[in-house]
Amino acid sequence: MLIVISPAKLLDFETKPTTQSFSIPEMLSESEKLIISLQKMSPKQISKLMGISDNLGELNFQRFQNWNLPFTPENAKQAVLAFNGEVFRGLNATTLSEEQLQLSQTKLRILSGLYGVLKPLDLIQPYRLEMGTKMKYRNSPNLYAFWQSLIVEKINEAVAGLGSGVLVNLASNEYFKSIDKRKLNAEIVTPEFKELKNGNYKTVTVYAKKARGLMTRFIIENIINDAESLQAFDIEGYNFNPRLSKHGNPVFTRNH
């Protein structure tokens, strides 16, 4: 069972890593093509491209200028420890054991606008480049077109290596769209997380993001390999809701 999740905009490159283990992203040569193109842009052009403030445009201009190969533990950090958004707060990788981190290397992939597909311990340097960014590169009108065939190839390799044929989609729609479903050799399972609000169960984005991280950790901690076993997920008040669920789309609800 392979899990895919989205990256985070928030990054933490200040806290010391909890492991000395690391790997190198497999598609850095593609990342470098994008970086060379981004390095030619001014801070204002970056702000416009990404729809971000001038301050963030300047920050990412500096990040792109500073980006350089080769990646080492001195100039980069493991992806699962560097990303710091709600999904990663739920996953809480800093408290995973070394054995669990190594297991995550086979069971978890992080989709990325700059790196394509990341293993948890792949080193990354600071960046912001969302998959939905309409960045043109040669014949590719956007990042989806740039990455699509490459990402699905890597995902298929990882799924085949695990043998279960199941892909657990815990990514956002923006990122999951980067996988070419026509070429995907896996059964897709997309869990949803809903909160009771005014008598109805609704998706609340901030809670759903954290729940995706909680489920990612649950799968790794319990070494889950089949879709049915996901129904046992009961962290932070969530429970499987058979009434709202359907095949390939298990729904977990909680009452505050």
Image: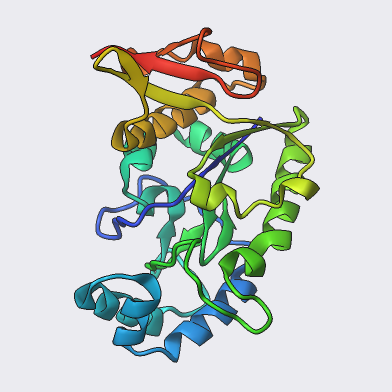
Residue 120 visible at all: no
**Image location (x, y in percent) of residue 103:** 58, 34
**In the image, is 178 to the left or to the right of 78?**
right
Which quadrant is the C terminus positioned in?
Answer: top left
Q: Camera-side residue: 219 or 180?
A: 180
Q: Residue at x 59, y 81 (%)?
A: 33
Q: Residue at x 30, y 55 (%)?
A: 10
**Image location (x, y in percent) of residue 187:** 73, 31
In this picture, is 203 found above or below 179? above
**Image location (x, y in percent) of residue 55:** 20, 75
In this picture, is 235 found above or below 94? above
Which quadrant is the N terminus positioned in?
Answer: top right
**Image location (x, y in percent) of residue 79:** 45, 54
Q: Quadrant of residue 229?
A: top right
Q: Camera-side residue: 102 or 7?
A: 7
**In the image, is 207 to the left or to the right of 19?**
left
Q: Camera-side residue: 182 or 91?
A: 182
